Image: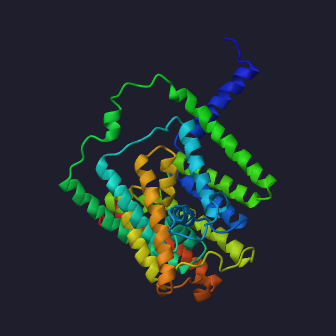
Amino acid sequence: MASPTFISSVKEEARKNYIAIFEQDWPSWLSGILIAFLALLIFLWQSPWGIAAGYKNWGDWFFFAVGMKTTKPSLPWLHTMSVSNFGLFSGALASALMSRQFKLRPSPPLEYIKGVAGGIFMGAGAALAGGCNVGGFYTAIGVFSMGGYAMMIGLGAGAWLGLRYLLWEMAKFPPKMTTEERSSKRVPSRIDWAKIQPYLGGGILFMAVSIFYLYSFLDKTQMGGLLFFGLLIGFVMHRARFCFVRAFRCPFMTGDAEMVRVVALSLAIYGIGSAVIKWNFLQPDTMGVYHPFWIGSLSGGVIFGFGMLLAGGCASSTLWRIGEGHIKLMIVLVAFAITNSWLNDFLTTSGLEGKLGKGILVPAVFSWPLTMPLFLLVLLAWVLWAVWNEKTEKCVIF
C-alpha cells in the first residue's frame, strides 16, 4: 500500500478539522466557557455585553422612519450593541451555512401569532428590567448588579407560567403537521445548495474580518472589535445550540439540569473575571450597574420569561436562530424591537422609570471580600437545586 503524499495528508487533516469545527455539534460546557471568555473581552474592549439596546436602536429607527420620533437615532453601524448584534447574527449565519444547516424554516400560523406576542412580552420585560436575558440577567449578575438576581427569579417564574400556558395550549389545540414538514414534500431544487453553502459561509467570515479592518481604517476600531466578538459569540452559540431559555424551561419541563450547570459555570467564570477587572480598577466598579432593583428587574423578568416561552427563544437565541433561517424568530425580533423602543420612551417621559428601582452594586452593600463567596454560593445553590430536581422531578410540571 502506497504511503500518502504530503498534500493528501494535509487535505485529510484539514477535512477532519473542518468536520470537528464546522459540522459536529460542540459540547454545551465548552460553549459556556467560550461565551464567558468572549463576554469578558467585550467588557475590557468597551463595556458589558448586551443585546436589548441594539434591538431598541432598530425600533427607534422604525419610529423615526414613520415620523413618530423627531430625534434621529444613532446609526446602527455606529451603535455599539447594534453592531455586536449584527456580528452575532453573522456568526450564526456563517456557522449554519458552513455546517449546511441553513434553510428557511416556516411555522404554522398560530406560531406566528405567538411570535408576535412573545416578542411584545420580551420587549416590554427588557424595558422594565433594564436589559434582556443577557444584559439584565447574565451580564447583570456577572458585573455584580443586584438587579440581575431579581431578574433571575423573575425569569424562572415567567418560564414556569409560560410552560403552564403551553401545556394548556397543547391540550386545547393539538399540534398538526407543520408547514416545514409539508414543505419537505415539495420537489427539490435543481441547485445543490449543500455544496454551495460552505462557500457562502466562508465568504461571510471573510467579509466580517474585512469590515473589522475597514472600521479600523476609519478610526472606528472599537466598533470593528464589537462586530468581531459578536460574530464569535454567534458562531459558538450556533455550534453548541446554546440557549438561555433551556436553563429556565428544562428544569420545569423535563427536569434536565444540563443547561443550568452550563450557565452557572459560564457565570462563575465571567463573574470572577469581572471582579478582577472591577476590583483592580481596570473598569469603574459601577460600570453596567443600572438595572432597577427590585421592582423593575423582578417584574421585567417575569414578563420576559413568559415571552421567551411563547417566542421559543430569548434575545440571543432569536438572533442565532434567525441565522439558521427561522421565520418565526424574525417576527419575534421585529415585535421585540418596536415594543422595547416604545416602552423605554414611555417609561422615561412618564416618570415611571425612577419608580421601578435603581442600580445597586452588590459589593457596595456586602463589600468585595464577602461578595465573591456569596456570588459563588448562589450559583452553587442554583445548580444543586437543579440536580436535586433532575433526580426527584419535584418541580417538573409536564
**Considering only vertical position in the picture, is 294 above or below 384?**
below
Relative to the observer, which residue lies in front, 387 or 22? 22
Q: Is residue 319 visible?
A: yes
Could you tell me residue 268's position as x and y percent? 58, 67
Residue lying at the far left in this picture: please name it: 172
The part of the image, by quadrant, that contains residue 162 is: bottom left
The part of the image, by quadrant, that contains residue 309 is: bottom left
Q: Is residue 11 left or right of residue 167?
A: right
- Please name the residue shown 48% across and 49% down the image: 321
**Considering only vertical position in the picture, is 97 above or below 219?**
above
Could you tell me residue 274's position as x and y percent? 65, 71
Residue lying at the far top in this picture: please name it: 1
- Please name the residue shown 59% across and 81% down the image: 371
Could you tell me residue 319's position as x and y percent? 51, 53
The part of the image, by quadrant, that contains residue 176 is: top left
Could you tell me residue 386's position as x and y percent? 40, 65
Q: How many marks?
A: 0
